[in-house]
Image (cartoon, grey):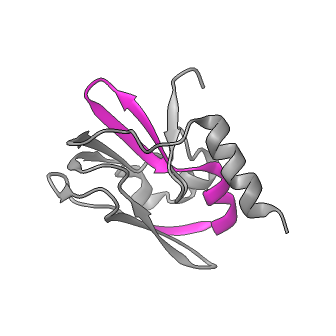
Amino acid sequence: MAETCWFTPTHEWVRQEGHALRIGITLHAAQALGDLVYVELPEVGHQVAAGDAVAVVESVKAASDVYSPVSGEVLEVNAALVDHPELVNEDPMGQGWLLLLYPMGSLENMLDQAGYDALVQSQTQP
């Protein structure tokens, strides 16, 4: 993927697209959850604060909150996930994106790919 992605310690990815941020869960998170059976998305226009739960992904194993990396307003949600939550497992950083957010904050606390890989490595070592 040519675009720069940023990551959170809670396993969300963020890609800047113009003035908006496209957000989803990482491949690591999708694999850890297993097969998703349900995705709950916010309403367009919903205002969120950084760190707020903005969506829920549910698998046969567990339900997990997805947190907003920055404050902002939801511009768009991936409606295809309502009928096809498996898209998150199949292509979490592509067709499995969750929402588009108009940010009202910065990405200063985000991890780059190397930082995120190091975080995952540290969490998976015994």
Is residue 49 something that shows in the picture? Answer: yes
**Residue 56 place in picture, x, y as percent:** 42, 68
Furthest residue toward top: 2
**Residue 40 place in picture, x, y as percent:** 37, 67
**Residue 31 place in picture, x, y as percent:** 69, 59
Tell me the quadrant of the picture where the N terminus can be found: top right
Residue 24 among magenta residues: yes
Is residue 34 something that shows in the picture? Answer: no
Closest to the observer: 19 or 124?
A: 124
Residue depicted at x 62% and y 36%: 113
Looking at the rendering, which quadrant does residue 51 occupy?
bottom left
Looking at the rendering, which quadrant does residue 82 occupy?
bottom left
Residue 81 among magenta residues: no
Closest to the observer: 19 or 125?
A: 125
Tell me the quadrant of the picture where the C terminus can be found: bottom right
| For residue 101, side relative to residue 126 (left or right) | left
Q: Which residues are magenta?
A: 13-39
| For residue 30, side relative to residue 123 (left or right) | left
Residue depicted at x 38% and y 30%: 16
Furthest residue toward right: 126
**Residue 9 place in picture, x, y as percent:** 54, 55
Residue depicted at x 55% and y 53%: 88
Closest to the observer: 35 or 73?
A: 73
Residue depicted at x 30% and y 38%: 106
Q: Report the label total.
A: 0
Furthest residue toward front: 108
Closest to the observer: 118 or 33?
A: 118
